[in-house]
């Protein structure tokens, strides 16, 4: 059987690749030679950029250019469980953080690897498809017009477009998690089944839901494999973007109305800085002429830091590598869009106050892939994941995190050249509150294991024997131990935001106003995760889509 798998899987993959390219050929609006000017120029075809491009070109009354540094994603990006495989390809910006002082002690050089999608669809093509709008309190201190109530119509619009599906309670592990929520039943605590943006067993991102709908509009042009190197200003008004084509030639394209930045929490502040917008001292250090001194560009960086907790199982109800690679699962997926490959293996999420857990129903952890993606030392990885050498191991993983961390980092330039990566310093766990908050999340995970159905499944929490923590009592109820565990093994959740914070024009922390216009200049807006004033208590991707929907309304109504 295994011998047949070795041959059949590549044949199936090749066949699908041919069919994909046949049915999804190059659309007419992918251009090599753009016009000299457009009404709107959108920089970045990620989660927000796909929405903005589609919505601004819908009426046909405006010419729109969407510029993307990457190209097309490989066909297997549509397979939900293939997300980790994309991190080793040219579809990943492959950023790294600075060595961290307060965290990441079990990682090589104390650096976190930071995957960001590079290509049409951006990080929406490499994420784990979890759908969330957080909780109403997340938006309490956001600017006028951006409350939870203000965004609610756009949340509904987003859910309709993104084909949100909920994990079935018929799955035994999912049912155990759901019932654990009922059994625990305490104030400010809830466990819910995971909701995903999936369609017919395949990834469904804003690329699918929005950009594909605009595929053949004559007023929308798309440039791929093209870098925007800076924004060109006439005094304080943005007039054009400077680009570098794939062949290395440089060009300028004029914007009649606006330039809209959708590059994300790292690339957007980097482009502003390269264009002369940011802290004057930072710009002068790299001999970049100051267009506008805007102190907080690149500041306020936040992320969720996940602590993995491995749970062993006696009952064969989880996802394992052995099951995934079985001929029956491969056939079910490619023939019917069903089975284990049609899911992300994330079954639920939980929240207690500002602490959260993600329930990942996969028992075996492939060391050859996951260790390098996480940048773990070998000893750390093996201590955390006892199933590293057993593809049949039954179990699951809780990811515990602080949903509203207080630590804040920054993004700065690495050099004055656009091709050099920015310096990313999240400063994880600089604020001790985040550790105590994560401890509460770990406690919630442990509480679920004491519920009836989980105990019937034979759950056994694994406590890692980490060199950094072996002087402490190995007990998840011990704050000193979980403090050490969090600072040693915590991993980025890829939920970066905040580096071009939204506020009103009198807020000295703000980079954009409530209309998303960059403060101090004319003709530039930002629509991406960088404008989030504070973290979302959950996954931010769907929130970004809803915000982009509202931004498109703002742009078309308030020109």
Image (tube, helix red, strand yellow):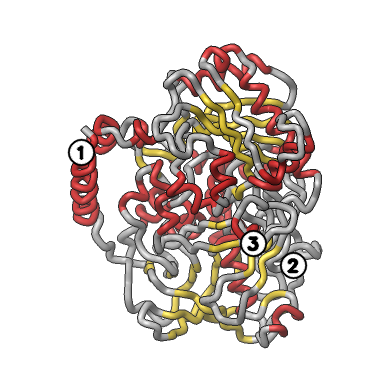
Q: How many residues crowd mark 3 within 10 Å: few (<14), some (14–19), many (20+)?
A: many
Q: Is residue 59 visible?
A: no
Q: How many residues crowd mark 2 within 10 Å: few (<14), some (14–19), many (20+)?
A: some
- The correct choice, above or below, for 248 with respect to 164 in the image is below
Report the disc number at residue 268: none
- The correct choice, above or below, for 257 with respect to 49 in the image is below
Q: How many residues crowd mark 1 within 10 Å: few (<14), some (14–19), many (20+)?
A: few
Q: Quadrant of the N terminus?
A: top left
Q: Secondary structure beneath disc 3?
A: loop
Q: Nearer the viewer, mark 3 or mark 2?
A: 2
Q: CA distance from mark 3 to mark 1?
A: 56 Å
- Residue 498, image x, y percentages: 67, 57
Q: Quadrant of the C terminus?
A: bottom right
Which residue is found at the position 34% from the left and 31% from the top?
A: 323
Report the disc number at residue 3: 1
Asked whether the residues under the numbered discs 3 and 1 touch, taking CB atoms below 8 Å apart as contact, a structural biologist would say: no
Disc on the earlier residue, 2 or 1: 1
Q: Which residue is mark 3?
A: 516
- Residue 177, image x, y percentages: 56, 22
Q: Nearer the viewer, mark 3 or mark 1?
A: 1
Q: Which residue is mark 2?
A: 296
Which residue is found at the position 66% from the left and 66% from the top?
A: 411
Disc on the earlier residue, 3 or 2: 2
Q: Nearer the viewer, residue 406 or 22?
A: 406
Which residue is found at the position 55% from the left and 67% from the top?
A: 260
Which residue is found at the position 41% from the left and 39% from the top?
A: 198
Q: Nearer the viewer, residue 432 or 301?
A: 432
- Residue 82, image x, y percentages: 39, 46
- In the image, taking residue 500 as reference, residue 493 lies left or right, namely left
């Amino acid at each position: 059987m295994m011998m047949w798998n070795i041959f059949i899987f590549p044949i199936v993959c090749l066949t699908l690749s041919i069919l994909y390219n046949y049915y999804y050929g190059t659309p007419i609006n992918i251009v090599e030679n753009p016009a000299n000017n457009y009404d709107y120029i959108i920089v970045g075809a990620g989660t927000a950029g796909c929405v903005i491009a589609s919505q601004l070109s819908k009426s046909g009354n405006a010419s729109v250019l969407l510029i993307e540094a990457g190209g097309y994603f490989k066909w297997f990006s549509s397979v939900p469980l293939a997300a980790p495989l994309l991190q080793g390809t040219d579809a990943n910006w492959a950023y790294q953080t600075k060595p961290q002082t307060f965290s990441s002690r079990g990682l090589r050089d104390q650096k976190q690897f930071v995957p960001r999608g590079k290509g049409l669809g951006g990080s929406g093509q490499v994420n784990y498809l979890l759908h969330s709008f957080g909780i109403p309190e997340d938006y309490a201190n956001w600017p006028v017009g951006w409350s939870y109530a203000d965004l609610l119509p756009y949340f509904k619009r987003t859910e309709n477009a993104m084909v949100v599906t909920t994990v079935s309670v018929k799955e035994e592990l999912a049912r155990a998690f759901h019932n654990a929520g009922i059994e625990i039943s305490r104030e400010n605590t809830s466990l819910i089944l995971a909701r995903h943006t999936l369609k017919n067993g395949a990834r469904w991102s804003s690329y699918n839901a929005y950009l594909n709908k605009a595929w053949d509009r004559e007023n929308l042009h798309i440039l791929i494999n093209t870098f925007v190197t800076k924004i060109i200003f006439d005094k304080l008004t943005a007039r054009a973007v400077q680009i570098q084509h794939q062949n290395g030639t440089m060009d300028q394209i004029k914007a009649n109305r606006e330039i809209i930045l959708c590059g994300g929490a790292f690339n957007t502040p980097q482009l502003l800085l390269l264009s002369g917008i940011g802290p004057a001292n930072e710009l002068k250090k790299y001999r970049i002429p100051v267009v506008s001194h805007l102190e907080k560009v690149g500041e306020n960086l936040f992320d969720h830091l996940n602590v993995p907790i491995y749970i062993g199982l006696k009952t064969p109800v989880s996802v394992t590598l052995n099951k995934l690679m079985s001929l029956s699962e491969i056939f079910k997926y490619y023939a019917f869009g069903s089975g284990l490959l049609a899911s992300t293996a994330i079954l639920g999420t939980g929240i207690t106050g500002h602490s959260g857990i993600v329930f990942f129903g996969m028992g075996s952890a492939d060391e050859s892939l996951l260790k390098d993606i996480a940048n773990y030392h070998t000893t750390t990885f093996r201590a955390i994941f006892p199933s590293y050498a057993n593809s049949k191991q039954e179990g699951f993983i809780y990811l515990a995190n602080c949903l509203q961390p207080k630590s804040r980092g920054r993004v700065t330039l690495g050099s004055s050249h656009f091709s050099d990566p920015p310096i990313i310093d999240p400063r994880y766990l600089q604020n001790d509150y985040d550790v105590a908050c994560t401890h509460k999340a770990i406690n919630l995970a442990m509480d679920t294991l004491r519920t009836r159905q989980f105990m019937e499944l034979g759950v056994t929490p694994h406590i890692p024997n980490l060199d950094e923590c072996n002087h402490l009592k190995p007990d998840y109820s011990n704050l000193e131990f979980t403090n050490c565990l969090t600072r040693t093994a915590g991993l980025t959740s890829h939920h970066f935001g905040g580096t071009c914070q939204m506020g009103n024009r009198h807020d000295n922390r703000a980079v954009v106003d409530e209309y998303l216009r960059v403060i101090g200049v004319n003709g530039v807006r930002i629509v991406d995760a960088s404008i989030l004033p504070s973290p979302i208590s959950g996954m931010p991707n769907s929130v970004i889509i809803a915000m982009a929907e509202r931004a498109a309304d703002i742009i078309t109504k308030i020109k």
